[in-house]
Image: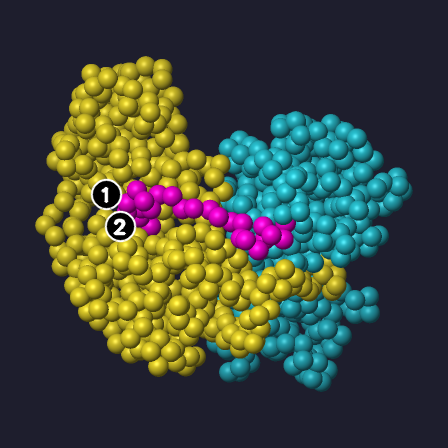
Chain colours: A yellow, B cyan
Amino acid sequence: MLLSAPAAYFYSMKFFSLSLILLCCSLSTTHAQDSATFRRISDQILLKGECYEDLRVLSKNIGHRLSGSESAAKAVTWAAETLKKAGADTVWLQPVEVPHWVRGKESLKINWTGNQNFEAIPMLSLGNTVGTDGRDLEAEIITVNNFDEFHKLPREKVAGKIVFFNYHFPQELVNTFEGYGVAGPYRWLSPTYASSKGAVAVIIRSISTGEDDVPHTGSLRYADTVKPIPAVAIGNHSANRLAAQTAKGTVRARLNSNCKMLDPVMSYNVIGEIRGNTKPEEIVLVGAHLDSWDVGDGAHDDGAGCVQAIEVIRTIKTLNLNPSRTVRAVLFMNEENGLKGGLAYNDSALANNENHILALESDAGGFSPRGIGLEMSKDKQEQIRRYRHLFLPYGVYDFEQEHGGADISPLKRRGVPVSGLIPDPQRYFDLHHTPADVFEAVNHRELKVGAVVMTQFIYLIAQTGLN
Amino acid sequence: MLLSAPAAYFYSMKFFSLSLILLCCSLSTTHAQDSATFRRISDQILLKGECYEDLRVLSKNIGHRLSGSESAAKAVTWAAETLKKAGADTVWLQPVEVPHWVRGKESLKINWTGNQNFEAIPMLSLGNTVGTDGRDLEAEIITVNNFDEFHKLPREKVAGKIVFFNYHFPQELVNTFEGYGVAGPYRWLSPTYASSKGAVAVIIRSISTGEDDVPHTGSLRYADTVKPIPAVAIGNHSANRLAAQTAKGTVRARLNSNCKMLDPVMSYNVIGEIRGNTKPEEIVLVGAHLDSWDVGDGAHDDGAGCVQAIEVIRTIKTLNLNPSRTVRAVLFMNEENGLKGGLAYNDSALANNENHILALESDAGGFSPRGIGLEMSKDKQEQIRRYRHLFLPYGVYDFEQEHGGADISPLKRRGVPVSGLIPDPQRYFDLHHTPADVFEAVNHRELKVGAVVMTQFIYLIAQTGLN
């Protein structure tokens, strides 16, 4: 784009439509002050924010950090130190026993041609899956396009086979999280379904929007009633090829993997807070998860949320905002393959009779923010929506989705109002749970604008409360 | 992000807030039908759109395509063929004489230490600048942080020197296009200012949001009253270093460049249209520019807009939408360093007494769409805003900015209502006019959702008109 004339230099920013202004005019007494504070927060983070540099350190010096790993332990130490430096009054570690799943060497080789030539293709075992103990598991592949097709198959067509679940991510859904909702069960449930009819292993088309061959890992859970069988994901290009080839004739595969579940390990949620000025017993929580899958950097998922939560603390402290209520950042452990951190936090909150007036999680990637999800009573939703005009200049317009976060779902089940940052969803499921989720895929400004909006929202709730 | 339980699979999408529904209820008779057509357009492009593949061909098979270059000529041929294949009723080339500026070999070497050691740093000559005819131009560098500082300097402090304009892109502006508006004059005007006080060359800090050392080219224009002097851009890291070093003591530089303006070349705007069903004489224009700078792939700027405009034609044809008014895609030549295509198009439209009821340009990158700019009378703005609810499910909420496009600005000056697609602005000025503006920096879904919204908007106007 060229600026062809000085007249083109100034793009006017008239974000406030007449209808919204009319809707909100009853709030105008506090508007000017809130709006000025919102701007101070934005200037601070966009000009002097440190979240992007924090993410570089977490991604590049520590790297991916699956629960139970050495790097997860390093991440705990780093997070505690960083929260302290950011200015939290108190920082502590909350013990959490976490599962310790390890991948090890693995391969999936396909016999495309019917001769003895098996070709390795890009693959990742799904998280928590059993492996083949380092032995070749060889069998014929049968392809089904969805659960309906699978459920119609008699047991004898499935027994002894590797079932390929060739379900496509529904690309037509503009909100890719809806698509994830539809496709996600193919990761969670396929191994259980296949095992129940005697299959020896499962291959899934990755839960992926990518036009590429990148495999996506992610959790599965076996039903107690079935024998656990190995489950792996392949990228979209390989999936296309496999679907075409199995339609033509018999295709065999050799799977070899060493993944297994080891004994649980003691780990920690990392917590830092700024004590409220007038109502310290009321807690506003801002959270993210510190663990990641064991590929890539875990940069969008969820390093981004972690460094944004830390930035909330840093900004409130740096600007001396002195919140009325306590603002607490919680970096949860083990969101990806157990949710033990979220459960332990909730247990502790319950035991200590803590009063959480709201919890927000950022766990949908470090992309430009577009909305804030509100899972709470209609009254509380309406109370928050009265402030939506304040967020419009920051590109945040959508307060209609009911979206929180996995780590804070145990709080929600106890009646705590929960929220989720809603970033632009187009790129997330190209990267999610893959080797491509690296620091370089995060844009510094998108990450920071997200942190701006989180800080504004958390501070607003810390000042106004939620009745 | 993990989906921890089946209950989490479904993120509800209640985009229509009560207030907006109330505002729009008078339009509900046409809503259902419009909404269904919008959805058909979206499904078609998200599932079967070809714009991403088109962009791969334009970026990777043809590459960057500065006006007058051989690749620009190839792009013209490709665009005409692609528009024809996309289903345009008529495709034609509109002759445009364009400037032919060439870069050639170039280097900027800095003597950081005061000894005889000159170190080359990443740089790009600004577009249309004069060069040094392949000879070393060596001089001392003086740094100014802005025009105010420069204007206070007496001529004798400037004469014979290389002036380094160290103006920082204002990162605090959430809308980076506002920042570009503020910083842009440092690219346009610095060479003229510096020359007027006898400087021998200009270095500018790139007009860049990047936290990197990537130089950004882009146009300048010399005032007729000054002697043209060479002007180059350096990346932010080098600019930081240069500012620090010149604050400490004397720093000299050697500039060597071969860029020059050759004789003008005959080139073309590429135009394809679908003739209107009932009011063919009323034209709805969708445009972008086919030329690019001579670095990178010109993928966001503006390959993205070109393939989106072609997708508009393809989708209207494929879905048999039979627009009432004529829909015309125009791929303008020479937006970057002359705007000759936009001027020629306007001359032709005037000569042929054509009736353009609206022109939309996509030239702000292939990112997720967030709004549609409206540069037109208040009445027409309000007429379009009545349909805003239709765009909300596609993430487009902002109809408040007055934003069109450079190529359609000559039409605007004659009173034609103009519009501009407004994508998310956070990443654009990291990439704009750089070697990093490559195909790989464009996300397939973001590009397609942009094409969806353009098609919806163009088709809407083609059906409803604009009174």
Answer with left or right where residue A132 lies relative to residue A178.
Answer: left
- Quarter the C terminus of chain A occupies: bottom left
Q: Which mark is residue A127?
A: 1
Q: Chain of mark 2?
A: A
Density class for disc 1 (Cα within 10 Å; few <14, some 14-19, many ≥20) is many
Tell me which residue sits at (34%, 27%) in the image.
Answer: A146
Q: What amino acid is found at the position of numbered circle 1 in the picture? A: Gly
Front residue of B238 and A182: A182
Front residue of B302 and A19: A19
Residue B331 in view here: no
The answer to whether the residues at label 2 and label 1 have Cβ atoms under 8 Å apart is yes
Residue A197: give x, y in percent of width and height: 19, 24
The region drawn magenta spans B1-24
Front residue of B47 and A237: B47
Residue B111: give x, y in percent of width and height: 52, 72
Answer with left or right where residue B14 lies relative to residue B65.
Answer: left
Look at the numbered disc 1 and give the secondary structure of its residue: loop
Look at the numbered disc 2 and give the secondary structure of its residue: loop
Q: Chain of mark 1?
A: A
Residue A254: give x, y in percent of width and height: 21, 27
Q: Are labels 2 and 1 on one chain? A: yes
Residue B10 is one of the magenta-drawn residues: yes
Tell me which residue sits at (55%, 41%) in the image.
Answer: B448
Q: What amino acid is found at the position of numbered circle 2 in the picture? A: Glu
Residue picked out by circle 2: A336
Tell me which residue sits at (28%, 69%) in the image.
Answer: A355
Tell me which residue sits at (27%, 58%) in the image.
Answer: A414
Answer with left or right where residue A154 lies relative to residue B49.
Answer: left
Front residue of A331 and B210: A331
Residue B310: give x, y in percent of width and height: 65, 36
Answer with left or right where residue A274 lies relative to residue A107.
Answer: right
From mark 2 to mark 1, how far is it between C-alphas? 9 Å
